[in-house]
Amino acid sequence: MVTVTAPVRVARRLLAHELRGLRGLGPWAARRRHGVGPGDRAAAYTGPQTPTLFAFAFLAVVETVVLAVVVPWPLVHAALLFVDAYTVLQIIALHAACVTRPHVAGADGSLRVRYGQLLDLRIPAPLVRGVRVDRRYPEGRALRFGADGTVDVSVGNQTTVTVELAEPVAFVRPLGRTAYARVVRLHADDPKGLVDALRGAQERRAAVADRPAPVPPEPHGLVTRE
């Protein structure tokens, strides 16, 4: 039996994320979205990061051109061209994954929180205890996982919606570890629209649950002979 070491597992996980991101280029070009069903509301979150991502892509192209002029060795040119071209491809793939995998407020009141190909956190409708517009500015990484079960999914160093859960929800972190979320803070370009969609779905769900069961009609037209 072959034992897979932790670095190998991490490398495999990163490669899987990268391949999944590259596969997102096709749906992005076709303007298709993943995991958005009839009656669901998709919530985009790419607004704050799009200018930054494409600025990095532009700088990579400029770097390639400048180094091609400055560095005199063809082999080095080829290596730098490959690295920069792949960097640009990765940037576009991340943007494509984020566009094609938006957050989703389900028609049943559930919520799917995503960040490109790196995170997919599903919250069933009964576990959404509260949701509100709540603008915060966490520092550091886009994905932050607190020991207390707080999950920050920030874009452009900001989150705009806070979701409180009735009980912890299990999810898989980008490198494969299982974690549990109690409070999720995420960014949505239209936070009010996402909050209203979730609250509306929850209210409809509660109304259906409170609706009394229909009373079966009494039988009629039957003649009983003794």
Image (tube, helix red, strand yellow):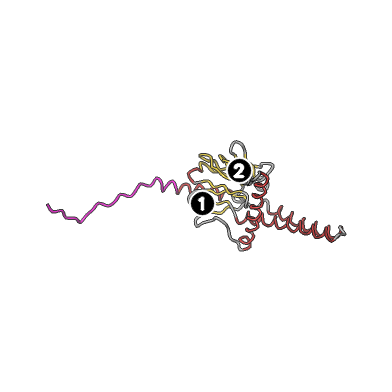
- How crowded pointer 1 is (Cα within 10 Å; few <14, some 14-19, many 20+) is rated as many
Q: Position of residue 62 (x, y in %)?
A: 79, 58
Q: Secondary structure at mark 1?
A: loop
Decide if residue 44 is on the left or right side of residue 61. left
Residue interval drawn in magenta: 205-226
Disc 1 target residue: 106
Disc 2 target residue: 177
Looking at the image, is 28 positioned above or below residue 49?
Answer: below
Mark 1 or 2: the one toward you: 2
Amino acid on which disc 1 is placed: Gly
Spatial CA span between label 1 and label 2: 26 Å
Residue 67 drawn in magenta: no
Which residue ends up furthest to the bottom in the rendered image? 30
**Is any part of residue 66 visible from this angle?**
no
Q: Position of residue 177 (x, y in %)?
A: 61, 43
Residue 223 drawn in magenta: yes
Please identify the quarter of the rendering in which residue 141 is found: top right
Q: Position of residue 16 (x, y in %)?
A: 64, 52
Q: Which mark is residue 57?
A: none
- Prevalent SS, magenta region: loop
At x 29%, y 51%, the residue is 216
Nearer to the camera, 124 or 71: 71
Which residue ends up furthest to the front in the rendered image? 1
Q: Position of residue 107 (x, y in %)?
A: 49, 52
At x 55%, y 55%, the residue is 35
Please identify the quarter of the rendering in which residue 74 is found: bottom right
Amino acid on which disc 2 is placed: Arg
Decide if residue 224 is on the left or right side of residue 191. left
